[in-house]
């Protein structure tokens, strides 16, 4: 049996040893089998990859939905506001001077064919 030389660590009591967190974790890796370490590492890597890709896809989907809805609905909202503003500014005198057919055509362009039919009917 060979006799080992004494290390300087053998002279220091265990409670006085200063280990960093990294050194402690590195020491723990010696206790865990390599197969289990690979499995945990692969699982963590796949989880990080999945979360990153989910974040990317979600971000893209929200951007597409927001811009599409803005492009689709903004012209209608602006025209509706303009029409409402015009109605409030001019009032009933403007509608009385226009023929009913012209009012119906304006409403049809803005709100569709059913609105034009309703505008042509006399108010009761």
Image: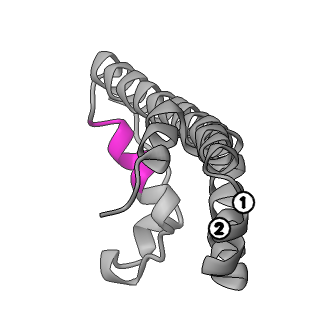
- Give the main secondary structure, helix, strand or loop, of the magenta stretch: helix
Asked if 55 appears above or below 1 in the picture, the reply is below
Q: In which quarter of the image is residue 94?
A: bottom right
Q: In which quarter of the image is residue 90?
A: bottom right
- The crowd level at tag 2 (other Cα within 10 Å; few <14, some 14-19, many 20+) is few
Q: Is mark 1 on a helix, strand or loop?
A: loop
46, 9: nearer the viewer: 46
Left or right: where 50 falls relative to 65: left
Asked if 13 appears above or below 8 in the picture, the reply is below
Which residue appears at 68% of the width and 53% of the height?
A: 99
Left or right: where 27 falls relative to 36: right
Considering every residue shown, the one lying at the far top of the view is 35
Give the residues drawn in magenta, as a range: 25-31
User: What is the number of the mark on residue 98?
Assistant: 1
Left or right: where 10 falls relative to 63: left
Q: In which quarter of the image is residue 98?
A: bottom right
33, 92: nearer the viewer: 92
Which residue appears at 51% of the width and 68% of the height?
A: 20
* C-alpha distance separating marks 2 and 1: 5 Å
Q: Position of residue 32 (x, y in %)?
A: 27, 32
Q: Position of residue 21 (x, y in %)?
A: 46, 65
Which residue appears at 53% of the width and 66% of the height?
A: 8
Which residue appears at 37% of the width and 61% of the height?
A: 123
Contact between labelled residues 1 and 2, with CB atoms less than 8 Å apart: yes
Q: Position of residue 18 (x, y in %)?
A: 48, 77
User: What is the number of the mark on residue 95?
Assistant: 2
Tally of numbered tags:
2
């Amino acid at each position: 049996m060979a006799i080992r030389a004494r290390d300087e660590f053998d002279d220091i009591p265990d409670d006085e040893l200063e280990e960093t967190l990294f050194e402690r974790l590195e020491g723990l890796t010696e206790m865990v089998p390599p197969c289990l370490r690979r499995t945990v590492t692969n699982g963590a890597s796949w989880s990080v990859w999945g979360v990153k890709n989910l974040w990317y896809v979600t971000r893209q989907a929200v951007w597409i939905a927001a811009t599409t809805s803005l492009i689709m609905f903004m012209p209608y909202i602006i025209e509706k506001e303009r029409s409402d503003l015009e109605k409030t500014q001019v009032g009933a005198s403007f509608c009385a001077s226009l023929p009913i057919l012209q009012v119906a055509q304006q409403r049809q362009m803005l709100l569709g064919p059913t609105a034009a039919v309703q505008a042509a009917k006399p108010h009761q």
